[in-house]
């Protein structure tokens, strides 16, 4: 498929200008662009600039407030609830993560649940904000219902990711960032474009039967929780997705489960919501609230080196540390640019024309 | 296979008397017995009285201190590190969870990492201690290395469970309690006894190749992280097990990864440990540090009812809420007793004879 390559700066500037154009304050346009394009840098292409026109369609529908009054509405020494005021999740999430970091500075840890937000880009970005402070960062979010719990024909959960970032000393940090489904929706889209089937355990069809059709979700089926089926532990993936949903939305007062508003603007949110917007959950733990940071980080180096140097199974070069593939790709893409597929380029070109911004 | 049924009180009393006999203080014998037998009640038979003689063998080797000085060695408003002084994990864990609950009472949340401990029974017991306080409870532990990360031939992680307990109002609580592997070791033992094969994705053999032999782990192979293989998301199960290991042991100063001391007394711990004993991690979050507890709990009722009443896939009666099967079994076993297999009965009878206690 045709593609061209763009620099980080090109994509950042375009995104920034688009966000300014719809009425975001300068500082929001900056952080929003940084979060969005960080996904493209790290190879999570489904959560980067390919989503930008989707955000703008939500703004056109009045579902995204470009100039929100993001605020703390409840707090304790180590917790807070943040109301995102229908803002871009790309902007609400870093605000809330900063609250978690401030709480941790004083109380050892900080935990922030967020309501009235929107899609927040890649989970890992927000978790990684903790690293510079010698803190462990956590980031969860709920999302549009596309996932069926074990034994359910209905879609009741989102792909509800979990991200955990842990600092090391000489080694790069440990950064896990994963959907609680067997495979993320972005991987299905790649297989659809190639006309390929999925492995087993990724998708069920509209009748709730296992399928290997990459179009299974589009055709009314569902993504499956990590594990795929009961025999392979899907009840565990379901439980993890449920915990993400509850921490993100039942703690904060956002919509949960099947009530989470759909990301696509052509579907309307449930007319009888159980909360406000979508929900996120963030955590920050000061390492030295447990033991001296240098001690912790040198043991992390040891942990990482031991795992990375483990004897491998046949045909595999090394055991990876969570975050390795994304970091390696980021190094390449910062140098060589970010490849975009033609449909994404066309979409951004159209968006630019509509808003009077060159792409 | 032959079995007989015992009442909770019988198993509790025997365990209590055994623990007293090896030198545990009365209060430790009580809590230790309660934690251990709670596993049998909830149907996690691999973690109940079937383990008792294993604990005693560790005591005989001097690896379990029956009268430990369990203490906080570092703290901040919302965190603590506990040194278990080589005590029974069954006793150290409730101590540490109580510290987390006390911290949460004051600071909103409490997070406790534990070193120098031993096997702590079922993860869910400790997480559920938070429920009576209108708190969410979390409980993690690392464990003897039996699990190979994705692409690894070596065993580097334990089955490293995650338990999360969340209170509701009229509905029973949400209680997830799961190994971060596709299947727990106890399930392999059941298949071994029946002479059956495992499903795919549970085990790899000594060469690191997929196998369906229920003896695969015994014969030098390994359990696989949730997901089973890369294509089915095993890198996610690996990342979850790694997070449990790091929070439990790198934060506290316990042994981590392949250095975790083996549970079986006939294998010696690594002569060059990287920490002390095994590690746990506990969390308690006061619900009303986020929103009024009544509001939260009535939304949990709504969450639980919506999921439980979802339309099911063919052949399945209902969508389960995490904790449903264990709670239902506990009700049955409290009334009808706890069935034990003949090898377990023989083992406990021998243990009783050795210590002069009737089983």
Image (spheres, coloured by chain):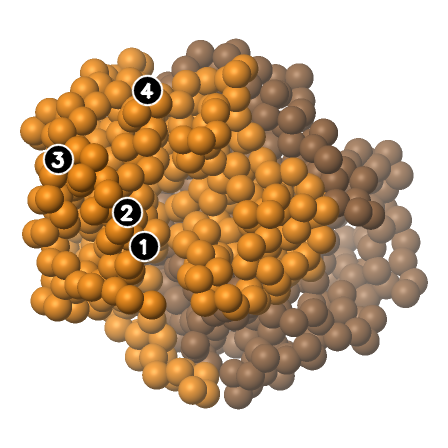
Chain colours: A orange, B brown
Give the CA separation, mark 2 to mark 4. 21 Å
**Residue at point 11%, 58% (across, down):** A7
Q: Nearer the viewer, mark 2 or mark 4?
A: 2
Q: Which quadrant is home to the N terminus of chain A?
A: bottom left
Left or right relative to B45: residue A350? left
Where is residue A5 shown, x and y percent of the image?
A: 17, 63
Q: Reading the chain from its start, which is encountered first: label 3 or label 1? A: 1
Image spot of residue B54 (x, y percent): 63, 63
The residue under the point 66% across, 51% down is: A205
Mark 3 and mark 1, same subunit? Answer: yes
Instruction: Read off the residue under disc 1.
Output: A343
Q: In this rendering, would A247 be left or right of A91?
A: right
Q: Nearer the viewer, residue A216 or B239?
A: A216
Q: Are marks 3 and 2 in contact (CB under 8 Å)?
A: no
Please give the residue where the numbered disc 2 appears in the rendered image. Answer: A347
The reply to whether discs 1 and 2 touch (Cβ–Cβ < 8 Å) is yes
Q: Indicate left or right for B38 with B209 as reference.
A: right
- Which type of secondary structure does the marked residue at label 3 adopt? loop
Tag 3–tag 1 contact (CB < 8 Å):
no
Dots 3 and 2 on the same chain: yes
> Are the residues at dot 2 and dot 4 in contact (C-beta closer than 8 Å)?
no
- Mark positioned earlier in the residue sequence (4 or 3): 4
| Disc 1 to disc 2, C-alpha distance | 6 Å
Element assignment for label 4:
loop
- Which residue is at a point 69% across and 42% down the rendered structure image? A153
Residue at (40%, 83%) from the top-left corner? A316
Query: Which residue in the structure is indicated by mark 4?
Result: A62
Alpha-carbon span between mark 3 and mark 2: 14 Å
Q: Earlier in the sequence, mark 1 or mark 4?
A: 4
Callout 2 crowding tier (Cα within 10 Å): few <14, some 14–19, many ≥20: some
Q: Which residue is mark 3?
A: A356
Q: Secondary structure at mark 1?
A: helix
């Amino acid at each position: 498929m045709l593609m061209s390559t763009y620099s980080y700066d090109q994509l950042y500037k375009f995104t920034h200008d688009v966000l300014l154009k719809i009425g975001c304050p300068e500082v929001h346009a900056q952080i929003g662009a940084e979060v969005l394009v960080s996904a493209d840098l790290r190879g999570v292409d489904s959560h980067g600039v390919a989503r930008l026109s989707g955000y703008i369609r939500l703004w056109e529908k009045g579902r995204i407030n470009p100039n929100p009054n993001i605020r703390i509405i409840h707090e304790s020494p180590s917790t807070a609830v943040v109301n995102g005021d229908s803002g871009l999740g790309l902007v609400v999430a870093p605000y809330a993560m900063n609250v978690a970091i401030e709480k941790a500075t004083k109380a050892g840890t900080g935990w922030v649940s967020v309501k009235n937000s929107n899609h927040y880009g890649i989970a890992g970005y927000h978790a990684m904000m903790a690293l510079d402070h010698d803190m462990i960062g956590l980031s969860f979010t709920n999302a549009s219902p596309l996932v069926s719990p074990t034994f359910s024909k209905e879609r009741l959960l989102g792909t509800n990711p979990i991200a955990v970032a842990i600092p090391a000393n000489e080694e790069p940090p440990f950064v896990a960032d994963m959907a609680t489904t067997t495979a993320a929706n972005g991987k299905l889209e790649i297989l659809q474009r190639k006309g390929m089937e999925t492995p087993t355990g990724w998708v069920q069809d509209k009748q709730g039967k296992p399928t290997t059709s990459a179009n299974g979700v589009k055709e009314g089926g569902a993504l499956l929780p990590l594990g795929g089926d009961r025999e392979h532990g899907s009840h565990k993936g379901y439980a993890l997705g449920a915990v993400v949903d509850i921490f993100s939305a039942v703690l904060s007062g956002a919509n949960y489960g099947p009530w989470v508003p759909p990301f696509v603007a052509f579907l309307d949110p449930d007319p009888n919501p159980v909360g406000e917007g979508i929900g996120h959950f963030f955590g920050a733990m000061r390492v030295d609230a447990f033991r001296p940071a240098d001690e912790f980080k040198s043991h992390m180096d040891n942990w990482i080196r031991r795992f990375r140097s483990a004897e491998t199974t046949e045909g595999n070069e090394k055991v990876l540390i969570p975050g390795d593939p994304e970091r390696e790709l980021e190094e390449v893409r910062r140098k060589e640019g970010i490849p975009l597929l033609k449909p994404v380029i066309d979409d951004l070109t159209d968006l630019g024309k509509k808003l009077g911004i060159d792409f």
